[in-house]
Amino acid sequence: EAGVAQSPRYKIIEKRQSVAFWCNPISGHATLYWYQQILGQGPKLLIQFQNNGVVDDSQLPKDRFSAERLKGVDSTLKIQPAKLEDSAVYLCASSLAGGAGNTQYFGPGTRLTVL
Amino acid sequence: GNSVTQMEGPVTLSEEAFLTINCTYTATGYPSLFWYVQYPGEGLQLLLKATKADDKGSNKGFEATYRKETTSFHLEKGSVQVSDSAVYFCALSHGDDKIIFGKGTRLHILP
C-alpha cells in the first residue's frame, strides 16, 4: 500500500515570495491533516479536512496561509507571502476517518527554508 | 490546556544499552497516549499507543505503560540497536483526533 506522498521535499524561497505544497493521501482515507514542525519542536496542526470540508483550521494563520482539498483527495497548502518564521517542515497526514481511535499516517514532509 | 513534556535530547547510548525516554502529560480525564518515531529522511510513524490507564503499548521491542497516577507514559527498550537511532515524539489525543506532540527526543545509538 502506497503511503502519503508529498512534494516537493525541499524548497528554498525568499521572504515575501509565495510557495505551495502538495499532498496525496493514502487511497480511501477521508481525513487529511497539515502540520507545521519548526526545528526543535513537535508538529503543530494547521488544518484538518474531512473529505473536502474543513473540520479545524483554528491554528492556520489565515492572513497568509491557505489550503484546499478539491474532490476530497489531494490537497495543497499555500503560503503567500512567506515570512522568515515560516521556515519549517510541513507534514501531511491522513487517516481512514476522523476520531481519536484512528491512526494518522504521515508523509515525509516538505522542508521549507525562507531566506 | 493539554500538553506533553518529554525529556530533552540528544540521548546517546551504546548498542545493547537499556533505554528510557521520559514523558509526562497534562490533560483532564483520560487521553489516548502515543509514541511516534521519525527515522532520518522519513515521515513520522506511530510506534505504539495506549488508550486507557494501566494499558501497555508495545512494538519492535519498545514498551510504554499508561500511568494515570503519575500522568506518565515513559518509553523503554531493553536492548537498543543502531537502527533505533531516530527522533521520538510523545503525544496525546483527547476527545477528538487532534494530536498534541511533545518536542521530540533525538536518540543516537553508538555501535
Image (cartoon, coloured by chain):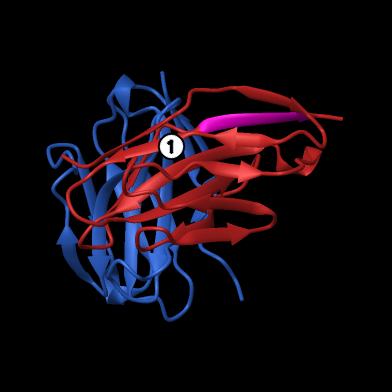
- Report the amino acid beneath label 1: Cys
Please tell me whether residue A22 is drawn above or below residue A63 in the rendered image: below
Is residue A85 or residue A103 the one in the foreground? A103
User: What colour denotes chain B?
Assistant: red
Residue at x 52% of width, y 60% of height: B57
Residue B7: x and y in percent read 47, 27
User: What colour denotes chain A?
Assistant: blue
Q: Is residue A6 visible?
A: yes
Q: Magenta segment range?
A: B105-109
Is residue A25 or residue B51 the one in the foreground? B51
Q: Which picture quadrant has residue B108?
A: top right
Q: Residues within 10 Å of mark 1 (few under 14, many from 20)?
A: many
Residue B1 in magenta?
A: no
Residue at x 87% of width, y 30% of height: B111
Chain ID at mark 1 = B
Residue B18 in the figure: left or right of residue A78: right
Q: Quadrant of the N terminus of chain A?
A: bottom right
